[in-house]
Amino acid sequence: NMGWQFINGRPVITARSGSWTPQNLVVENVQPTKVVMTGSVSNTTALADDFTISGFTIDSLAKDATNKILTLTLSVAVISSDVLIVVFKGNSYNVTNNVNP
């Protein structure tokens, strides 16, 4: 059962079943070892081992108080030319890389 939600003015399909899926994934210049993922519902069960990013080692996973924003900490910093794709539960999600050259 799917529904529409708008994130940053863009439509995205969201699962209404209550399962967390990352909808907005980004790494910022100010924290180049952090991949921040935002979902529409909380996720209290995810572990760092549930995620992979080819070419990177994930050191840890942190969750905000709502359990909707999950942050992966990588063992090395992302550089501007890196292309990151997070794999979670067999699905691939592109990461917006905002690291400056």
Image (tube, rainbow, N blue to C red):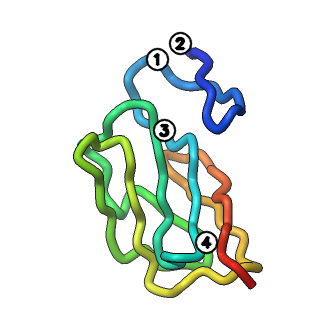
Find numbered disc 2 in the image and state the secondary structure of the residue it sits on: loop
42 is higher (above) or lower (below) than 95: above
Horizontal relation, residue 32 to residue 79: left or right: left
Residue shown at the point (58%, 15%) measured from the top left? 3
Q: Earlier in the sequence, mark 2 or mark 3?
A: 2
Number of other residues with Cα within 10 Å of mark 2, as a class: few under 14, some 14 to 19, many 20 or more: few
| C-alpha span from label 4 to label 1 | 29 Å
Q: Foreground mark, 4 or 3? A: 3
Dot 2 and dot 1 residues touching (CB under 8 Å): yes
Horizontal relation, residue 6 to residue 69: left or right: right
Residue shown at the point (57%, 53%) measured from the top left? 25
Residue shown at the point (56%, 40%) measured from the top left? 23
Pick the residue in front: 59 or 5: 5
The residue tagged 4 is 54
| C-alpha span from label 2 to label 3 | 14 Å
17 is higher (above) or lower (below) than 98: above
The residue tagged 2 is 1
Q: Amino acid at mark 3?
A: Thr
33 is higher (above) or lower (below) than 20: below
Find numbered disc 4 in the image and state the secondary structure of the residue it sits on: loop
| C-alpha span from label 2 to label 4 | 30 Å
Q: Earlier in the sequence, mark 4 or mark 3?
A: 3
Horizontal relation, residue 97 to residue 68: left or right: right
The residue tagged 1 is 16
Q: Position of residue 4 (x, y in %)?
A: 62, 18
